[in-house]
Image (cartoon, coloured by chain):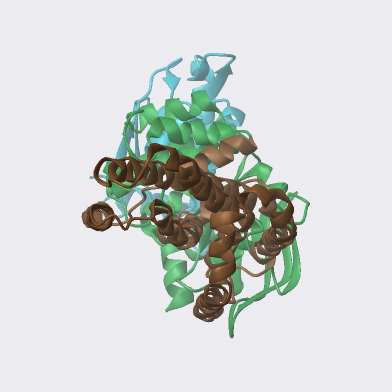
Chain colours: A green, B brown, C cyan
Amino acid sequence: MNAIECKGLSKQFEKNFALQEAEVKIPENRIIGVLGPNGAGKSTFFRLLVGQIKSNTGEIHVLGQKPSWELNHQIAYLPDRARWYLDYSVEKTIEYGKNFLPGFQEDKAYDLADRMKLDASMMTASMSKGQEAKLMLILCMAREVPLVILDEPFAGIDMIAKEQIMETIIDLASEREQTILISTHEIAETEGLFDYVVFFKEGKVILSGDVEELRGQQGSLQSIYRELYR
Amino acid sequence: MFWNLVKHELKHRSSEKDKNSSHKRYIKYIYLVVFLVIAFVFITKLALAGELDPTQIWNVLYGLPFALIGISRAIIKREQRCNTVGWWLSLPFRRQTLIWAKFLAAMWRSILTYLIIFVLGLVGFFYALLIDPKLQLHDIGNFLLTGANVGLIMIVIGPLVIALGMFIGILALTEYRYLVSLFWIGFWVVWALVISSYAEVIFHFIKHQYAAFPGVSFIAWLPCWIITYILIVFMSVLLERKLV
Amino acid sequence: MEERKVGSFVFQIDLSQPLYEQILDQIRSSVARGEIGLGEKIPSVRELAISLKVNPNTVMRAYQELERDGLTEKRRGQGTFITTSKDSIASFKSELAERYCLEFVDKMKSLGYTEKDMIHWITHAKGVNK
């Protein structure tokens, strides 16, 4: 079954098309890389999936339903360029997750914080960018929901934090049936993570498929990326 | 769940994005101190001359609507400035619920602001009592009632002002964001017109009509609250359909 | 290409080739060469995926294939182990040897060589006896 199916999806902001007749099919229970340069439509696509914005034309089915606030019970979403509330501590953040995010597992969250070396009393205001990114990842990954959407979880953070985030994603993906969508620019470092990819270019999907098959036919994702966008 | 959301809205107040610009926080306090000094000098001067009408202290409350519109606009704008708007808008709640939570948080903060001013006013009164030979303790009855009357007016128009402030904040998140400055200008013009045309009426009301409050204000109260409700519904529709 | 040591294995992962085959082949050869002992526990799918920074489904596929080969056994609640049967390994090794030979023979035939030529090539090709 497909976790996500979109037909003829278009979204226009003022005069610019962020998505133009995009056709997207994404299988469930995989880790999916959503790749492409800035402005290719990745974030717009994600925001449409969580119902934050409405498409101009086209159909979207997420987990077999149309996007809505109710459907967000089943979606963990790390927003585009998101930052966390500065006067929240790790502990308060976990409480936020427990209060507002369906499927949020407090124990799991503390466990993850512990493994990623985030002290419960630490405040966001005193965190490095990497620590903040890890905290936001916990908010998403501690949820037992069928769909996780991470918009640029690796952007602008140090190598160690990046590795810890990757390890956390792999760790949780190996114990759960979950569809995880990740958009990123750091293909070289992260491409092992993905078993399915979708390449966006100028508001359209120009290539998608099983990563192992693509590797067999065309080589690494990095070299495919180079060829597609050069 | 809903009250937790209101609590959350009340909690994250001081989210200065740039950690280096914490001096902005001090500026707030400096304004406050300057204001208090001016008020102090003013009261002292008038009271010593025996010319103080203590109810004039409440004129400060005319500034309240501006504070309110600032508070309510900030409660939306803060999400945008701190890049947390994505978290806010992907919470699994109806848009209207999200707006109501912010609205109530802004209301709560406005009431607190009013109460603080009220207490400060009272302090001012007692200070004047010490140095003004003409002022008597029994003047306090009239003084308090006048201050309370302004509070009652705030109950009538406060929610509407808060909704307007939030509306400006929301508008900035939508494809109609270019209307924000127009809206601001409109707001100031309307406000100036209201003040200049009805200052007498309002002032009279504040000074003398408190006894008649429920009857008189009901005429104003209902339409204000209905418009507030309509604005909240409208904001949730904007959030649902018109975000950029 | 970077070497990564996981438990008794050393992996070299090349991102331009299917990862599943590389993981499979490299575990197979370590077992065939006897670098890992009979009955020894191997890393779980999760451990291996985390240390190689590779998708767990990919590792899982390789593990399933190893089990089908008869090289590993799953023990419930304990994890995955290299088979304790020498015979399984021996037979797998000979199977693999046969498969490689057939591939070689096919390729040589396509170049028009006879059996005798092939033997000559095997014993005299540059580098074979080094």
* Closer to us: A76 or B223: B223
Please tell me which residue is depicted at 48% across the width and 43% down the height of the picture: B144
Instruction: Name the spot of residue A185 as percent of width and height, x first.
Output: 41, 62
Q: Picture coordinates of residue A35 (x, y %)? A: 50, 63
Q: Residue B165: which quarter of the image?
A: bottom right
Foreground: B150 or C93? Answer: B150
Left or right placement of residue B137 versus residue B199 in this view:
left
Is A111 placed above or below A130 here? Answer: above
**How many numbered circles does the render carry?**
0
Indicate whether A85 appears above or below C27: below
Question: Of residues B145 and C106, which is closer to you in this image?
Answer: B145
Residue A52 position (above or below residue C56) = below
Residue that sits furthest to the bottom in the current view: A15
Q: Is residue A165 left or right of residue C66?
A: left
Above or below, comparing residue C33 to residue B27 in the picture: above
Residue C58, image x, y percentages: 53, 42
Instruction: Determine if residue A181 is in view.
Output: no
Query: Which corner quadrant holds the C terminus of chain C?
Result: top left
* Residue located 71% across and 56% down the image: B216
Name the side, left or right, on which A79 lies relative to A124: right
Q: Residue at x 28, y 54 (%)?
A: B50
Question: Does residue B231 appear in the picture of this structure?
Answer: yes
Q: Position of residue A127 (x, y in %)?
A: 29, 43
